[in-house]
Each structure stands twice: as C-alpha cells, then as structure tokens.
Image (cartoon, rainbow, N blue to C red):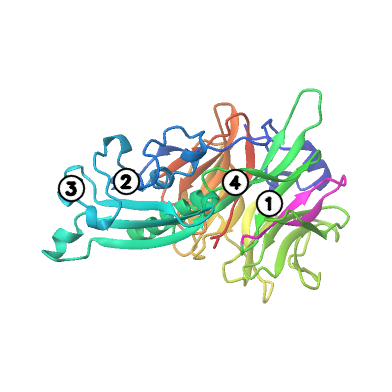
Amino acid sequence: MIRQSKRFLQRCAVLSLLTYLFLFSVPSQAELNLELTKGIDRALPIAVVPFAGQARDASNSDTKQAQQNIAATIQSDLQHSGRFKVTDPQSIKRFPHTADGINYRYWQKLGVDDIVVGNVEPAGIGKVKVSFDLIDVYGKAKTGPGGSNYLLASKEFVVKKSDLRRLAHHISDIVYKELTGKAGIFSTRVAYIVVQRTQGKPPQYLLEVSDFDGYDPHVLLHSDQPIMSPAWSPDGKELAYVSFEKKHAEIYVVDVASGKRRLVTSYPGINGAPAWSPNGKQLAVVLSKGGNPRIYTIDLATNKVTVVTRGWSIDTEPSWAPDGKSLLFTSDRGGSPQIYRVNLANGKIARMSFNGSYNASASFAPDGQEIVMLHKNGGLFNVALQNLHTGTFNLLTNLGQDQSPTMAPNGSMVMYATRFGGRGVLAVASTDGRVQMRLPARNGDVQEPAWSPFLS
C-alpha cells in the first residue's frame, strides 16, 4: 500500500503533491530479474542460435560464462520485450553460425520467421571478435532463386571479453530496430532508490544504477538520510538527485562513471524534483526560498536561478518538453493536484489533465505527442497515458499501488514502482497496454525508477 513518508512531508511541506515514497528493506546488491507477465498476441517468431565459440548450455545464470553468453542475453532481451516469441533453445537441432549455413526449410518447419546466428573468436589479449547475421527465413523464397533479400543485418565487432553482455544488448537493439522499426532499449540503464531497514538501526538509503534488465547493479551513493528523485542527464553521463545528508534537502549532480559529484542547490526549505533540459544546460527544480514551492530553472554554467511559476499554489514535479520550450508540472492551483504546462517564453500556463481529481508525476513521450502520469481514482493509483491532440486517456496499469512513472527513450514502455507479493518492485508496461513485466528484487524493494536516455 502506498504510504507517505512523514519525514519528507514534514521537511518539504508539499503534502500529497510530491512523489510517494516506499520505505522498505532491500540488500544493496540485490539484482532485478525481468519477468514477463503479459505479452502481445501474434508476437514475432524468432530463433537465436547459440553463437559458435560459446557454450550452448547457458541455463546456469550464476556462472560467468552464462552471464557473457551472447545468444542467451539476446534471447532474454527479445523475449522480455513482449514483442517476440523466442524459440526454446532446447528445441533447436541445427546450429549454423553464418547466413551461408542456413537450411531455410528446417527453420520454416520450426515455425520461425527470423533467425539470429553468430560467431565468437579470439582477437588478441583479452579481446574477442563477434559477428552476427539476422536472417529472414522467408526472404530467399520471396525473391526467388538467387535472391538475397533474406539477410536483414550483418555486422562484426571487436570488444573486450568483459563487454560481451553489453555487446549482446547492442545486437538486440539492432534486431529490434530491423524487425519493429523502433529503436531498441536493451542498452539503456535504470537508476532507482533503495532503502535498507534493519530492526533497531536507522534506515540506509542507496542510489543505484543497473542495466535495463536489472543486471549488474552498483551503488552510486549510500547515506543514512533520505535520497530521492534521480534524474538522468540527456547524455546519460550524470544523475541529478535530492539528498538529505546534511539534515535538509539539497540537489546534487553525480557523474555515473566516476562517482564524483557536485552540489547544485542548498537554499533554505525545499530543494527538490530536479529535471534536466533537453540540451543538458539547465535543471528545472522546485524551491521554496520565496515562500510556497515554485518551479525554477538553474543555468548549470552560470548558476543563474530563474523563477518560472508564481502565486500561492504548490507547484512541483517539473518535466521538460522534448523541444525545451515548455514544462509540465503538478499544481493544486485549481483546488486539487493536476497537470499543467507552462510556456517558458511567455509564462502562460494551461491545464493539461481533466480526468479525475488527482493527476501527478507527468512527463512527455519522446515525440511530445503524449504524456504519462500517475492517476488516482477511487483511492487507487495507476499509470495513465494521455494523447495531447485527441485527449484520449488510457490506464496502462490496474493494480492501484503505483508511483513514479518514467518512460523509455523510444516511447514504447513505461517503468514504475508498485507492489507485488508484499514487496515494493519495479514494473514495466508498454504504452499500448499489451505488454507488462515485473522486475522483482530478490530480497527486498526498490522505488523511484528513472529510465536513462539512449546510450552510445
């Protein structure tokens, strides 16, 4: 059940407009494991053949070899996208590793439309050369004898052995793009907050980052005071967040690779809800230095602070439009929490949400055509998507205990915090409502996810 953090409410005095917090126990090294709970009908049938040069049995996910197994990672990526029906590796009896070795009739009888094959071989000390082909099983038949339309992608890479899993995600992105027309999100990362609670000891708060699928989590910050509101920079190299380590709210920016950080704001009262501008040059934040919580922008080069909203309302949770010309924010200026949009050029404000008496935590889809938000109805908090042109309003979730929605950089998925089996977990829903996944922590709970941009 969603519950408000009394400490946060007392310190910030922004009542129900600020993001709800889960305060649970979780070990710092717990990994998140994707579990597909709902996939689309008519998923694309595909087979990923074990790459030559790697073991075919990748069932033991605890071994280093299995973790680096390229085919197994690609299989997992595509299966968990909900848009592919991946052939069970145990049913594969032929193991080609190039397009030239394909027996098309065999794969057609297996009910496969496309296959991924590849090869791994040494390429010097600590390095390997990886090649792969993506083949349309019916392409050669379509083009007739001598046709070559079956080869959809063919690439070669030389990488460190330690980067094999990252490369596998990259290959998954290529496959996804070729077969769906959308950029894949398998190489993206997720930031989130972890809270450790041990009886008789003060809570411990951690800012963690993991791969999209929850693999390889690592701690960027560990504190005995609350941490909240992680937000990725547009280049994916930094995270802004709120920390109470000095007994009051401050906004920091941390370099994800090095862990080095810098203080951005430390005004009396609220310093909260940082959001990066699309060009990475500004942060939109919530400050109460002038009285009520208002939206401000901070120029990161000059530290110039500019007020964006005014009045007696409580304004919070800013989020930039993709073109950088406006901000979404949550406000009670109409009597209840709703989503508003402010034009940064002229300061004009327009209400954006009209369904129900509570809408908050909004952000734009990458194309700027839709917004995702947290919607309350009958005491239930669910994730909703609203089309800005048609006004169409759709609920993406229905568990009623959701918070902190964050959209994937390709606009196809929304990640959010919820509860399952008595624990706080992260979950993912597709923006068309047809795919759902859970990322349960093995021994605890996570909260406040933030999905990274595309990473090079």
Query: Which amino acid type corresponds to the residue marked 2 in the rendered image?
Result: Val
In primary-sequence order, the first of circles 3 and 1 is 3
Magenta-colored span: 236-254
The location of residue 14, given as percent across then percent down, is 76, 48
| Amino acid type for the residue under numbered disc 4 | Ser
Write the residue at 30% across / 44% down: 41
Q: CA distance from mark 1 to mark 4?
A: 13 Å
Circle 3 residues within 10 Å: few <14, some 14–19, many ≥20 = few
User: Which is more N-terminal, label 4 or label 2?
Assistant: 2
Residue ID for mark 2: 49
* Precedes in sequence: disc 4 or disc 3: 3
Above or below for 326 versus 108? below
Residue matched to label 4: 210
**Does residue 146 show up magenta in the picture?**
no
Q: Which residue is mark 3?
A: 108
Tell me the quadrant of the picture where the C terminus can be found: bottom right
**Distance in Å between CA atoms under marks 2 and 1:** 38 Å
